[in-house]
């Protein structure tokens, strides 16, 4: 069975700071990957690298056997690789009555 999502030896971060170093995973159809850890260990950074919201400093990302390492976020989203961050409530300043 071929890989659905595969990333090998990826690294990236913000500016000159490398947050994620040398991460490799192969996911096949039906498999699930959980990324766990305390605050500040790189979970969101990893997702942003995979979805193209942060630049890949090294390594390779493939989706359905297609190298998407250089694809911008909007092209990855068209393939189904996207990021939906948790945000504050849209109506957080309204009362229940409003």
Image (spheres, rainbow, N blue to C red):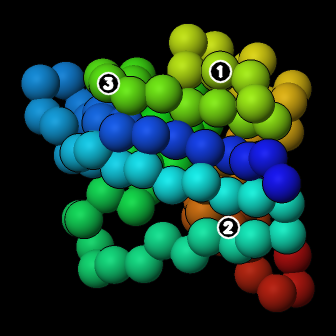
Which residue lies at the image location 88% right of the left edge and 85% below the top edge? 97
Mark 3 or mark 1: whose residue is earlier in sequence: 3
Res. 89 mark: 2
**Position of residue 11 measured from the top left corner of the image (x, y, whole percent):** 30, 36
Left or right relative to 91: residue 21: left
Q: Secondary structure at mark 2?
A: loop
Left or right relative to 60: residue 18: left
Mark 2 or mark 3: whose residue is earlier in sequence: 3
Q: Badge 3 is on which residue?
A: 58
Left or right relative to 88: residue 45: left
Q: Nearer the viewer, mark 1 or mark 2?
A: 1
Gap between marks 1 and 2, in whole Å? 36 Å
Q: Most extreme residue toward the left, as rendered?
A: 16
Quadrant where the C terminus is found in the figure: bottom right
Q: Secondary structure at mark 3?
A: strand
Which residue lies at the image location 81% right of the left edge and 36% below the top edge? 64
The reply to whether residue 61 is visible in this rendering is yes
Q: Badge 1 is on which residue?
A: 67
């Amino acid at each position: 069975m071929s890989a659905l999502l595969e990333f090998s030896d990826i690294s990236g971060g913000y500016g000159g700071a490398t947050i994620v170093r040398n991460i490799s995973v192969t996911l096949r159809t039906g498999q699930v990957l959980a990324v766990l850890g305390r605050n500040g260990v790189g979970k969101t950074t990893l997702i942003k690298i995979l979805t193209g919201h942060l630049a890949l400093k090294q390594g390779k990302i493939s989706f359905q056997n297609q190298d998407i390492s250089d694809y911008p976020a909007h092209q990855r989203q068209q393939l189904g690789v996207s990021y939906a961050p948790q945000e504050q409530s849209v109506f957080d300043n309204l009362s229940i009555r409003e």
